Image: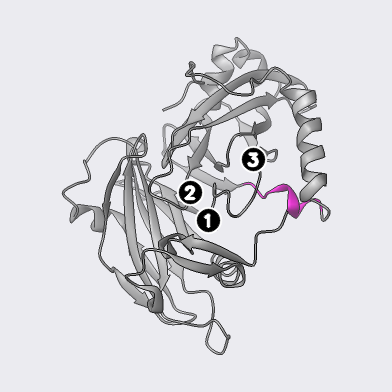
Amino acid sequence: MPPPAEIPAFDPRFLRPCTFALLRELGYGTRISINNGIGPGHELAIDMSMSMSVFADGGNHLATTPEIDRLAPGQITKVSIDDLLDDLDEVPDEGQVLCMLHMVPVDLLGTDAVDMPSKTMMAHVSASDDFIEYHQRPKGVVTGVAYQTGPLNDRRLSSTRSTVCQAPKVIVAEPVDTLMLLMNTSTSFDYDDTVRMDFWILGPGGERVARSHVEVPPFSFRLVSTTQVLEQAGALDDYRAGGGVGMFLGYSKNGTVVPISLTRNRESGAIACDHTLPPVFYLSTWGGEARLQANARLEQEFFADVPAEEPAAAEAIAR
C-alpha cells in the first residue's frame, strides 16, 4: 500500500536522515559525504540545515547537536564524525554508537511536528545517496559505501514492516571474515521496537549451511560475524574447504533493518563495504499483495519455525 498523500504530525528531523554505525571497536574512524540532492530550479529546492543525533547501544538518545552546516540546493559537503564527537561530552569514547545526520528544510527549523507531504519526503530521499567512509589509523585503509536510509519503521508510511536480505556475499577464508552490519532506526526518538532478523548462510550451490538469528534494539546496530556463526554451527572447516564463498539470506517480519556487509581482513585491516538493494530493484511488481505473498513463501520455505512474537532469547554471535 503506498504511503498517504500527507503524513500527519511528522518530526521534520526525520524527513531526510543519514544513518550510520561507528566502527570504533574495529579501529575505524568515520567521515560522511552528504548532499542537498535537490538542485537549483526544482520546485522543492531549499536550503537544508544539518544537525546530528547520537544513540548509545540499546537506543539511549545521548545528544542532538545544534546546526552543523547549511547546504544550498545541490551542494555537497564532507563531515568528520570523529571531530564532531570530540565536542560532545555526552558521548563516551568506547561502546557502540549509532549516529543520524538530520537534513531539515530551513523553513521547518524549530518545528516539532508538521503534516508532511509524501511528495516532499520522496523527493528529498530519492536524491539523497550519501557516502559513508571508514578509515583506519595508522595504516591508512580507507573504504566506504553510498546508500540512502530514509524514514523507516513508521506505521504511517507502511502498514507492514519487514526486511528481505538476499544478496550479500559471505566470504570466509582466514584471515578474512564477512560481518553483517544491521541497523534499526525509525522516525521518532520514542521508538522502542527491537527487530529480530532470522538468517541462513547458504553455500555456493544454494545448500543450507548454518542457521541463526539476531535481535537489533532500537536506534542500535549489530555486527554479526559469519565466521563465528559457521564455527558455532560446526560448519566452518567444510565451508572453507568448499571455497569459503556463499550467501547471506535474512528475513525480519517485525520491523525493518538496514543491512550492510563488511568483508574484512583481520590482519591488514583492509575492508570492503556493500549494501543490499531491496527486492523492488529486482522485481518491478514488488509491493502490496505481491510483497506479502513473496514474504509468506520465503518464510514457509526457510523460516517456518519463527515465532510470531519472540521473547528475549539468545542472539546469534554478535557484537
Residue 317 has which mark? none
Label 2: element kind: loop
Rendered position, 293 above or below 11: above
Classify 10 Å Cα crowding around label 3: few (below 14), some (14-19), many (20 and above): many
Q: Position of residue 239 (x, y in %)?
A: 66, 19
Question: Which comes before the other along the chain, label 1 or label 2?
Answer: 1
Quadrant containing the C terminus is top left
The residue beneath circle 2 is: 186
The residue beneath circle 3 is: 163
Q: From mark 1 to mark 3, how far is it between C-alphas?
A: 14 Å
Q: Is residue 142 visible?
A: no
**Region of the chain picked out in magenta, as a range:** 276-283
Tell me if residue 277 is in the magenta stretch: yes
Label 1: element kind: loop
**Outermost bottom residue:** 41
Q: From mark 2 to mark 3, how far is it between C-alphas?
A: 14 Å
Kind of residue sitting beneath label 1? Pro
Given contact means CB atoms under 8 Å apart, are the residues at marks 1 and 2 in contact? yes
The residue beneath circle 1 is: 151
Q: Position of residue 213 (x, y in %)?
A: 57, 23
Q: From mark 1 to mark 2, how far is it between C-alphas?
A: 6 Å
* Residue placed most toward the observer, 182 or 173: 182
Kind of residue sitting beneath label 2? Ser
What secondary structure characterizes most of the magenta part?
loop
Kind of residue sitting beneath label 3? Thr
Along the horizontal axis of the image, is 38 left or right of 218?
Answer: right
